[in-house]
Amino acid sequence: MNKVASNCSAESPFLFFDFEREKMPQANRRNRRISSTSTSASATSIIVITTTLLLSFSLPMTESAIGVNWGSVSSHKLKPSTVVDLLKDSKIQKVKLFDADPDALVALMRSGIQVMVGIPNEMLATLSSSTAASDLWVRQNVSRYLVKGGADIRYIAVGNEPFLTSYAGQFQSYVVPALLNLQQSLAKANLAGYVKLVVPCNADAYESSLPSQGAFRPELTQIMTQLVSFLNSNGSPFIVNIYPFLSLYGNSDFPEDYAFFEGTSHPVTDGPNVYSNAFDGNFDTLVAALSKLGYGQMPIVIGEVGWPTDGAISANLTAARTFNQGLINHVLSNKGTPLRPGAPPMDIYLFSLLDEGAKSILPGNFERHWGIFSFDGQAKYPLNLGLGNKVLKNARNVQYLPSRWCVANPSQDLSDVANHIKLACSVADCTTLNYGGSCNGIGAKGNISYAFNSYYQLQMQNEKSCNFDGLGMVTFLDPSVGECRFPVGVTNTNSSGFRTHNRWSVICFLLVWFFIM
């Protein structure tokens, strides 16, 4: 769950092209640098020009659609019905789920929103080995919802970034067999013509020194050939996740302006083509990689792309708004990229809809702050999605806990508070307190209060949860300072069960399948 692309001028001493987002379980992501070098343009130019002309004549003109990723690894989880109302109010017509959460799918029924459901990587082995298992999964997670007045499921994401280098091939051999079994199961259910199977890939699946030289990793060439052949035969797009933020976050020498869409002083020259932003460079690297396999015209969907608002120096509201609005304007302009002029991505799914305060922070503290909305469904900044609304609409009818907070007791000696802070922050989200965070500068006592309050709200304001051996006290005065917001929890939540939903859905599926077998 839960980033990529970059490049610099050939004259620049820092030549980086691609940072991939690697997703371990619980969204553990790492970054890898690929060096970019200047090359002679003569032979490359001919290839690039020929490819560009062929693509410009053969690719259909399409209008991109903007969707969102709806993750649920949250400390304060809104009711699914509240989230669906939020989507509808903001005129968001496409949503991508990371599993087949029945609560979310029920809420999406009759909404008119097109849905992509996900299959966790841990299920691939079972689905690849048994048509009975794939039949069962389709019945439980697709057929039962895809009825008149039901949820409009259009895609099934088979795994999530299963080819990551960090997985060391753990899931690689299961992907294509699982696809074949699931396709057969969809056909049995008379859904094969409506529901498309896809495999969201991380950008580390391909690599190059320049976009026109893009190629899939050598060890993936065979399986990628099989995958894109399957996708092409069944009318499915290639889905890739691209995160320029990680390029900037992962290397201090990366030119910041190249991550955005407002022009750069470090453009990348690739034969006759000039790249002014990391997104286009990464996208065209994939186009070139697909072309090498004979599928240069395959539609491409961006499964995840976005910018976090907290938890790192470059993660803030201004940068997130600049990136996301620039991306949306760029894609909806239908300008396309140098290798696909006039043919932008088929769809893009912003990452993400809501902040997820219980995600792993192994990749960085920013991991919990990707949302265009805060955890309670309030828009963080003005954003025009090009969907009819000029700005995002806030969630309606959110039920908050009482307006009270837990803070450090000023009458107590706080010199022995370290263990209490450690305990509170091991359970609750304190990532905004760290370097680069919005609450990093509120002082020692403020840090204590923030940690206490985060734990207190997570415990649904239980009176005992603000004790901390007498060091905490409840206040009715909002202790928020500037951009540092001390949150109040929400009551329309089922947070006690959200953390283990994915795990138990996998376990239950496997138990049912074992019983049937």
Image (tube, rainbow, N blue to C red):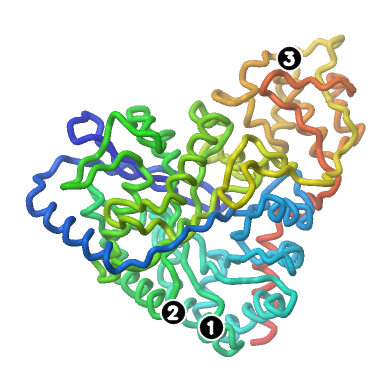
Q: Quadrant of the C terminus?
A: bottom right
Please determine whether, in this image, residue 480 is positioned above or below residue 203.
above
Residue 252 % position (x, y): 37, 28
SS state under label 2: loop
The numbered mark, 2 or 3, whose residue comes first in the sequence reads: 2
Q: Name the residue under label 2.
A: 234
Residue 214 sits in quarter:
bottom left
Give the residue number, with chain letter if any, for mark 1: 192
Label 1 secondary element: loop
User: What is the CA distance from the residue labelled 3 to the residue labelled 1?
Assistant: 59 Å
Q: Residue 445 carries which label?
A: 3
Mark 1 residue type: Ala
The reply to whether residue 19 is visible in this rendering is no
Query: Where residue 72 sits: x, y (%)?
Result: 68, 52
Q: Which of 194 and 247 is in front in this view?
A: 194
Residue ID at (86%, 23%): 469
Q: Which of marks 3 and 1 is nearer the N terminus?
A: 1
Q: Dot 1, how many residues are within 10 Å of its Cα: few (below 14), some (14-19), or many (20+)?
A: some
Tell me the mark number nearer the camera, choosing from 3 and 1: 1
Circle 2 or circle 3, nearest the eye: 2
Seen in the picture, residue 88 relative to 258 is either above or below; the reply is below
Q: Which residue is pictured at 64% across the width and 74% down the height?
A: 510
Q: How far apart are marks 2 and 3 (CA)?
A: 59 Å
Pointers 1 and 2 in contact (C-beta within 8 Å): yes
Name the amino acid type tagged 2: Asn
Instruction: Describe residue 345's horizontal placement relative to residue 13 as left or right.
Output: right
